[in-house]
Image: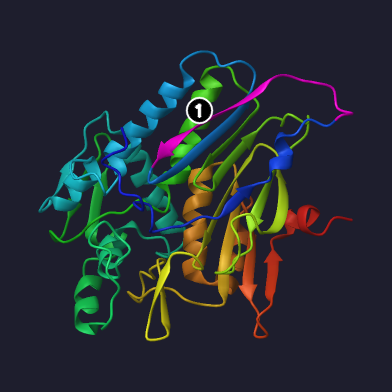
C-alpha cells in the first residue's frame, strides 16, 4: 500500500514533537472513564499513531489507511502519477478535477499563509529543495555551490508571481515549465486534521493523533485530563525521547519545525532542509526550532516552517499579532546553551505560577 512512497517525501519540513506516554496511563486514584485504544500504521514516509477513547465503531484502521492513500495520491511528489506530480511535470499548468479536494485544500492554505507571511512560506521552492538534495530527486549533497544555477532557479520561485489561479473550478497556471509545487510543509498537518474529522464523524470525541510528530489532541486522555506532548530538545545528539518542555494540549494542535536533524555537512558547513525562498539557500541561524499551537494542525504546520525562515525576532513579532496561534522558540545561545521564548498565551505552560 505504501510502496510508492519515498521514506523522506516530507523532508522539506521535519517536525519533532514527542508524545509523553504519561498521558496514556491511568492514575490509581482516577476513576476509569472508558477504554482507550491505539491504531498505528505508515503514511507520508513516516508513521501515524492514533489513540482514542471508546470502542472502535468499525473499520477505522482501513478507513485511515484509505484516507491517507487518497491524500498521498494528490499531494506526494514521490508518487510519479500523483496530482501534484502531474502539475509539476506539465508545461503550463492545468485545471483540477472537482474531486481533488486534498490538493485544493493544501493549495489554498499555502496561498493564504504565503500572503500572511509576505512570502516566507512558499510552496514553489520545490526546484530549490531538489537542487540542495532534500527533494524527490537523487539525494546528493551539494559539494560545490553553483550561484548561477541558484539564480536561474530563483526565477521559478515566488507563489504570487508564477502562479495564477481562480476558484470553482480551481485552475492553476505556470509562467514557466520549471515551476513546481511542494506541499510538504503543510500536508502532514493537513493529514492530521483529516484524521480528526474522520474520528468525529464516527462519534469519537477523545483522541490524540500523531503523524510523524504533528499532533492534534481533543477531549481527554485516559487519565481524565489533558493530553501531554513533549517538545524535543533541538540538539543533533539528543535522543528521540529527550524533551525540552512538556505541554498539555486541550483541543489544540501543535507542529514543530527544526533544522537540527535533517541536514548534511560539506567541508565543515552544514546545509539544512529549510530553504529560504528569498535567498535560495538553506536557512541556518541560531533559531533551532519553532513550535506553533493552533486549532488546525495544517495551519500550525505551515507557520512553523514560515517562522523558521523568518527567524526568531520577525516570527515572534508576527505571532504576537495573531490571536489564533501561539509560538514557542528554542534558540542556540553563544555559550552553547539553549534559550527559549514564547508568546504570552503560553506563559501558563512554561512559567506556571
Q: Residue 58 at x, y = what percent?
A: 50, 13
Q: Quadrant of the C terminus?
A: bottom right
Q: Quadrant location of residue 223?
A: top right
Specify few, some or many for label 1: CA neighbours under 10 Å numbering under 14, 14-19, or 20 or more. Answer: few
Residue beneath the point at 53% across and 50% down? 300
Tell me if residue 34 is in the magenta stretch: yes
Q: Residue 127 at x, y = what percent?
A: 24, 64
Q: Above or below — where is 18 with respect to 287?
A: above
Q: Which residue is mark 1?
A: 197
Residue beneath the point at 24% across and 77% down? 150
Q: Above or below — where is 105 with respect to 119?
A: above
Q: Nearer the viewer, residue 107 or 67?
A: 67
Q: Nearer the viewer, residue 246 or 241?
A: 241
Looking at the image, the residue that sits furthest to the left is 91
Q: Quadrant of the N terminus?
A: top left
Instruction: Point out the stretch of residues depicted in magenta.
Output: 28-43
Q: How is the image coloured?
A: rainbow
Residue beneath the point at 68% across and 45% down? 20
Q: Nearer the viewer, residue 213 or 237?
A: 237
Q: Report helix, strand or loop for mark 1.
A: helix
Query: Would residue 11 appear left or right of 300 to someone viewing this image?
Result: left
Q: Nearer the viewer, residue 281 or 40?
A: 40
Residue beneath the point at 20% across and 83% down? 148
Q: Quadrant location of residue 317?
A: bottom right
Q: Can residue 227 be spotted in the picture?
A: no
Amino acid at each position: 500500500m505504501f510502496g510508492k512512497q519515498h521514506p523522506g517525501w516530507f523532508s522539506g519540513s521535519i517536525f519533532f514533537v514527542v508524545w509523553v506516554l504519561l498521558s496514556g496511563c491511568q492514575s490509581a486514584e482516577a476513576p476509569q472513564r472508558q477504554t482507550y485504544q491505539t491504531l498505528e500504521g505508515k503514511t507520508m514516509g513516516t508513521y501515524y499513531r492514533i489513540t482514542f477513547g471508546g470502542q472502535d465503531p468499525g473499520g477505522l484502521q482501513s478507513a485511515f489507511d484509505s484516507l491517507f492513500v487518497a491524500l498521498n495520491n494528490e499531494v506526494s511528489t514521490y508518487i510519479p502519477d500523483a496530482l501534484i506530480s502531474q502539475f509539476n511535470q506539465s508545461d503550463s499548468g492545468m485545471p483540477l478535477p472537482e474531486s481533488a479536494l486534498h490538493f485544493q485544500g493544501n493549495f489554498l492554505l499555502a496561498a493564504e499563509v504565503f500572503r500572511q507571511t509576505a512570502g516566507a512560506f512558499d510552496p514553489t521552492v520545490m526546484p530549490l529543495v531538489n537542487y540542495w538534495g532534500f527533494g524527490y530527486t537523487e539525494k546528493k549533497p551539494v559539494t560545490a555551490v553553483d550561484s548561477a544555477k541558484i539564480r536561474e532557479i530563483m526565477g521559478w520561485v515566488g507563489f504570487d508571481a508564477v502562479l495564477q489561479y481562480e476558484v470553482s473550478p480551481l485552475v492553476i497556471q505556470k509562467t514557466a515549465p520549471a515551476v513546481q509545487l511542494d506541499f510538504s510543509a503543510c500536508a502532514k498537518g493537513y493529514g492530521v486534521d483529516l484524521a480528526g474529522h474522520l474520528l468525529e464523524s464516527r462519534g469519537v470525541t477523545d483522541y490524540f493523533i500523531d503523524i510523524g510528530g504533528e499532533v492534534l489532541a481533543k477531549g481527554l486522555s485516559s487519565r481524565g485530563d489533558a493530553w501531554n506532548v513533549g517538545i524535543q530538545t533541538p540538539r543533533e545528539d539528543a535522543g528521540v525521547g529527550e524533551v525540552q518542555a512538556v505541554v498539555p494540549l486541550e483541543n489544540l494542535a501543535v507542529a514543530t519545525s527544526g533544522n537540527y536533524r535533517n541536514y548534511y555537512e560539506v567541508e565543515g558547513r552544514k546545509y539544512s532542509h529549510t530553504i529560504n525562498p528569498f535567498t535560495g539557500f538553506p536557512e541556518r541561524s541560531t533559531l533551532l526550532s519553532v513550535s506553533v499551537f493552533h486549532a488546525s494542525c495544517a495551519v500550525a504546520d505551515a507557520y512553523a516552517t514560515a517562522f523558521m525562515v523568518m527567524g526568531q525576532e520577525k516570527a515572534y513579532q508576527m505571532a504576537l499579532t495573531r490571536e489564533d496561534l501561539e509560538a514557542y522558540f528554542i534558540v542556540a545561545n553563544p555559550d552553547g546553551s539553549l534559550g527559549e521564548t514564547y508568546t504570552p498565551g503560553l506563559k501558563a505552560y512554561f512559567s506556571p505560577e
